[in-house]
Image (cartoon, rainbow, N blue to C red):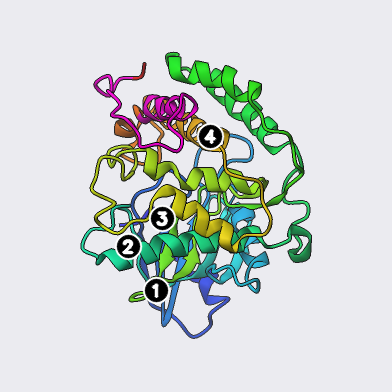
Amino acid sequence: MSDLDSARLKAWLAARLPGASDLDLERIGGGQSNPTWFVTFGEARLVLRKKPAGPILPGAHAVEREFRVMRALADTGVPVPRVLWLEQDESILGTPFYVMERLQGRVFSDCTLPGMAPQERRAIYLEMARVLARLHAVAPDAVGLGDFGKPGNYFERQITRWTRQYRDSAGPPIAALDRLVDWLPANLPPDDGDVAIAHGDFRLGNLMFHPTEPRVIGVLDWELSTLGHPLADLGFCVIPWHSTPEEYGGIRGTDWQAGGIPARDDFVAEYYAHARPTAALAPFHAAFALFRFAVIFRGIADRARAGNAASEEAASLAPLAGRFARRALEVIDGDWPGPPAPLPLAGGKET
């Protein structure tokens, strides 16, 4: 079943792919962002992403930005799906949407990578680090993205933005988030003016790998992309080493070392071995990433309470706001670079 207007979509596609007639749609489950479908139209195998229906925050669910950044990166060596068409006429499917090619590969939702040989797990993680370095090496001006965001003072502006979103939430206060709201602006690193194309959600689950090789063939889900600091993405990438499988798929508490997954510091070293000159990753960057993730999950909780979250999982994900905030406090209280200590969780409640 699909909630797309198949007749309108079929007519729209027929104008671009004449000769095809059979249309098949499959909604892709999961995620909290833009609704997505596999589309088969004749011999064409496509993916369609659109803005959700109903009221949304200004600037949110910006499929136009996703389309723009992937098109700009098409010839850079950063692996992205080939985007085909952007449609901003809301009369077609109710909201703007775009269509891209459908890649054939593997997407891993479990960061422990079960069923793999240790050497393949290691290769997959190190490939992720190299692809992130490759993205950050692209000069925004060189690919027409010089105006894709505001350059400079990235962390200061982001802290202000996410703090405001947290303060505007209708949910109960979270003590750990309140502390982060004070700590982060007081511990801002000096602005070094480093600007890169930042993905904003660069993690294993947003990468498609070759069907048999530990090689990324597509970086997916560019909804949060902007001009930002490269260490915001890198700080976000190390979250799995600080979170458990129950905390959105982390590896903490598992036997990841024996499984071949590289240590966090080895992952970071691989990034720097292939990156352009970049400042050192510090506790601030990981704490900021965890803070931002916490506020994102607070927003998911708010939507779940209001009954308009994009996923049936939203209500169960709501407690992660408090959990990720507490993980950030561990980082700033000394969990860097030593091994993390067990963290008691208050029964899944926000505290």
On the question of residue 155 being in view, the answer is: yes
- 275 shown above or below 242: below
Q: Amino acid at mark 4?
A: Pro
Mark 4 residue crowding within 10 angstroms, few (<14) / some (14–19) / many (20+) = some
Ranked by sequence position, the earlier of labels 1 and 3 is 3
Disc 3 to disc 2, C-alpha distance: 12 Å
Q: Which residue is mark 3?
A: 204
Q: Secondary structure at mark 1?
A: loop
Q: Amino acid at mark 1?
A: His
Mark 2 residue crowding within 10 angstroms, few (<14) / some (14–19) / many (20+) = many
Ranked by sequence position, the earlier of labels 4 and 3 is 3
Disc 1 to disc 2, C-alpha distance: 14 Å
Q: Which residue is mark 4?
A: 283
| Image depth: mark 1 or mark 4 in front | 4
Disc 1 and disc 3 in contact, CB within 8 angstroms: no
Disc 1 and disc 2 in contact, CB within 8 angstroms: no
Range of magenta residues: 320-349
Disc 1 and disc 4 in contact, CB within 8 angstroms: no
Q: Which residue is mark 1?
A: 210
User: In x, y percent, where is residue 344?
Assistant: 27, 23
Disc 4 to disc 2, C-alpha distance: 26 Å
Disc 1 to disc 3, C-alpha distance: 13 Å
Ranked by sequence position, the earlier of labels 3 and 2 is 2
User: In x, y percent, where is residue 25?
Assistant: 36, 65
Q: Secondary structure at mark 3?
A: helix
Q: Secondary structure at mark 2?
A: helix
Q: Looking at the picture, tell me which residue is in the foreground, 114 or 149.
A: 114
Q: Which residue is mark 2?
A: 121
Left or right of 76 on screen, residue 53: left
What is the tally of numbered marks visible in this picture? 4
Disc 1 to disc 4, C-alpha distance: 33 Å
